[in-house]
Image (spheres, helix red, strand yellow):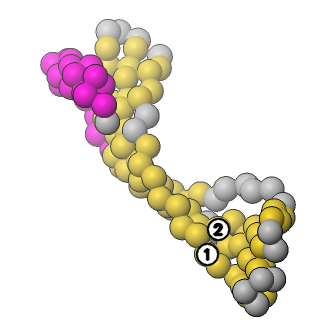
């Protein structure tokens, strides 16, 4: 996280705790990606997406009121997904090998609502 974002987020947390109307919670769930089933070929190597598997996400959030009708909700969410794909390499003799790629990322959204 860039240093320029740390100060505003810290001030936001202090403002929320000062109002004494802060709620904390957990988020969990399952997810999947919709991927177009395309084949990419170059120099004797072919790559085709076979299946997008289900992943999971979990995290925490804090919701605090700002004024009478406005709220702010920062969150920290960890996401994990995986994709199966078929690789065919005619040069090295590898034919139709199914491989799995795992993706993990951390999201830090900031919601403002009424």
What residue is rendered at 25% in x and 28% in y? Answer: 3
In the picture as drawn, the residue positioned furthest to the top comes out as 67
Q: Is residue 101 above or below residue 4?
A: below
What residue is rendered at 71% in x and 73% in y? Answer: 85
What residue is rendered at 32% in x and 19% in y? Answer: 65
Q: Is residue 37 above or below residue 111?
A: below
Between 3 and 68, the residue placed more toward the observer is 3
Indicate the position of residue 15 as horizontal and vertical percent values.
Answer: 21, 18
Q: Which numbered tag is attached to residue 83?
A: 2
Q: Check disc 1 and report its element: helix, strand or loop.
A: strand
Q: Are marks 1 and 2 in contact (CB under 8 Å)?
A: yes
User: Quadrant of the image for the N terminus?
Assistant: top left
Q: Check disc 2 and report its element: helix, strand or loop.
A: strand
What residue is rendered at 37% in x and 23% in y? Answer: 72
Based on the picture, tell me whether residue 20 belongs to the magenta stretch. Answer: yes
Q: Is residue 61 left or right of residue 18?
A: right
Between 37 and 23, the residue placed more toward the observer is 37
Indicate the position of residue 11 as horizontal and vertical percent values.
Answer: 21, 19
Magenta stretch in the rendered image = 2-25
Secondary structure mainly formed by the magenta segment: helix
Q: Which numbered tag is attached to residue 100?
A: 1
Between 77 and 102, the residue placed more toward the observer is 102
- Quarter of the figure with residue 95: bottom right
Q: Is residue 94 left or right of residue 8?
A: right
Q: Mark 1: few, some, or many residues within 10 Å (few <14, many ≥20)?
A: some
């Amino acid at each position: 996280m860039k240093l320029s974002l740390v100060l505003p987020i810290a001030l936001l947390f202090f403002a929320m705790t000062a109002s004494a109307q802060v709620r904390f919670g957990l988020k969990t769930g399952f997810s999947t990606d919709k991927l177009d089933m395309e084949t990419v070929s170059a120099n004797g190597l072919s790559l085709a997406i076979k299946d997008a598997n289900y992943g999971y996400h979990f995290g925490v959030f804090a919701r605090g009121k700002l004024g009478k009708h406005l709220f702010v909700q920062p969150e920290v969410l960890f996401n994990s997904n995986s994709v199966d794909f078929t690789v065919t390499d005619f040069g090295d003799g590898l034919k139709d090998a199914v491989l799995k790629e795992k993706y993990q990322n951390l999201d830090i959204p900031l919601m403002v609502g009424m």
